[in-house]
């Protein structure tokens, strides 16, 4: 049986779906909600009635998915993908801030803006403090009761994001959402998240899936239609970036991000939305560079892009 816990969150998404799947006395909880008092009360009240799950699976490290994981640290087997755990280790390191700060500055993003981005890392450390994660990898099977779920590695939204296949349905976290396109950000220099994401979309589309259970919004059935819509969105974004570079002839990441047609003008975006826009812009730039469409010119303290000749 599948139960949906709608845990509240601020902003347009309104809530995150945490899914509890039960078979006899054993169960799996997928994602945990934000580390807010509101979500803590809602989740705790649910657990008082239904008990703690055998397994908690975190689809990825974002706070609305991992935020209340400490609640289960002595009660449940907590699972996360090996790639996501590897990235979390990097995220908490001094190397991460040094490397990415330099990269963002070289791409022309203001220092004050970047400072805010790194400010909340200590909060993340509090979220996972003293939690023992058990890592899973692509293809692993999680057994509970007489049933089982299969782990599907679907990098893109994060590079260790996982979905879970259960009979003819897939619990897809933030991989495929019906009403918005998931943010695809470059957050580690070695990654090509957009390429990984497009390949992950193809993987889910090839499965025989009757229904997707996303972390935000309602379950939906027409997987292929939604996958094609998301692909088209990224195709348009790539074309827009190419056109911006063509007009400017030479542009850094900030030049490009501040000219993209977001849902609001750049100056009207919140700081958080600008952070998302920065990561999204750089992931599309990385894709175009690796496809040979544009060229990266990397000087000592500055990075620019031009159309490949």
Image: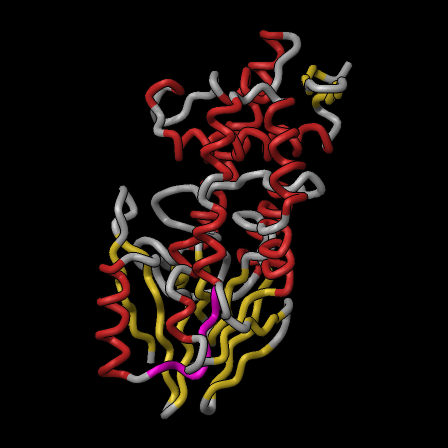
Vertical placement of residue 1 versus 291, above or below? below
Answer left or right for 21 relative to 129. Answer: left
Give the residue at x 77% y 14%. Answer: 309
Q: Quadrant of residue 307?
A: top right
Judging depth in this view, the residue of 44 and 285 nearest the camera is 44
Q: Position of residue 117 (x, y in %)?
A: 48, 36
Answer left or right for 99 relative to 197. Answer: right
Vertical placement of residue 57 versus 253, above or below? below
Q: How many marks?
A: 0
Q: Position of residue 84 (x, y in %)?
A: 59, 58
Give the residue at x 50% y 69%. Answer: 130
Judging depth in this view, the residue of 158 and 91 nearest the camera is 91
Q: Position of residue 219 (x, y in %)?
A: 33, 60
Question: For residue 54: magenta?
Answer: yes
Q: Position of residue 71 (x, y in %)?
A: 37, 72
Give the residue at x 49% y 47%. Answer: 121
Vertical placement of residue 80 versus 295, above or below? below
- Asked whether residue 24 is in view, the answer is yes
Vertical placement of residue 151 versus 295, above or below? below
Question: What stretch of residues is rendered in magenta?
Answer: 52-58
Name the quadrant of the N terminus.
bottom left
- Asked whether residue 240 is in view, the answer is no
Give the residue at x 52% y 41%. Answer: 184
Answer left or right for 168 relative to 238. Answer: left
Question: For residue 291: magenta?
Answer: no
């Amino acid at each position: 049986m599948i139960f949906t816990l709608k845990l509240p969150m601020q902003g347009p998404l309104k809530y995150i779906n945490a899914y509890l799947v039960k078979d006899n006395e054993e169960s799996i909880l997928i994602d945990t909600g934000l580390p807010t008092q509101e979500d803590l009360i809602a989740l705790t009240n649910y657990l008082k009635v239904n008990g703690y799950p055998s397994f908690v699976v975190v689809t990825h490290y974002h706070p609305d998915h991992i935020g209340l994981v400490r609640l289960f640290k002595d009660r449940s087997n907590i699972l996360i993908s090996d790639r996501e755990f590897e990235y979390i280790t990097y995220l908490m390191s001094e190397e991460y801030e040094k490397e990415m700060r330099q990269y963002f500055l070289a791409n022309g993003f203001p220092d004050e803006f970047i400072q805010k981005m790194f400010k909340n890392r200590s909060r993340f450390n509090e979220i996972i403090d003293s939690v023992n994660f058990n890592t899973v990898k692509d293809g692993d099977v999680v057994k509970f009761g007489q049933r089982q779920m299969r782990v599907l590695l679907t990098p893109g939204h994060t590079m260790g994001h996982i979905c879970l296949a259960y009979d003819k349905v897939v619990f897809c976290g933030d991989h495929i959402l019906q009403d918005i396109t998931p943010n695809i950000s470059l957050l580690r220099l070695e990654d090509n998240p957009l390429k990984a994401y497009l390949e992950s979309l193809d993987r889910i589309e090839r499965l025989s899936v009757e229904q997707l259970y996303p972390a935000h919004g309602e379950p939906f059935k027409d997987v292929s239609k939604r996958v094609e819509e998301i692909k088209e969105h990224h195709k348009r974004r790539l074309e827009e970036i190419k056109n911006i570079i063509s007009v400017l002839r030479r542009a850094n990441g900030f030049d490009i991000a501040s000219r993209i047609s977001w849902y609001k003008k750049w100056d009207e975006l919140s700081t958080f939305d600008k952070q998302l826009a920065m990561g999204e812009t750089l992931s599309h730039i990385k894709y175009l560079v690796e496809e040979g469409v544009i060229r990266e010119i990397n000087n000592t303290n500055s990075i620019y892009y031009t159309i490949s000749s």
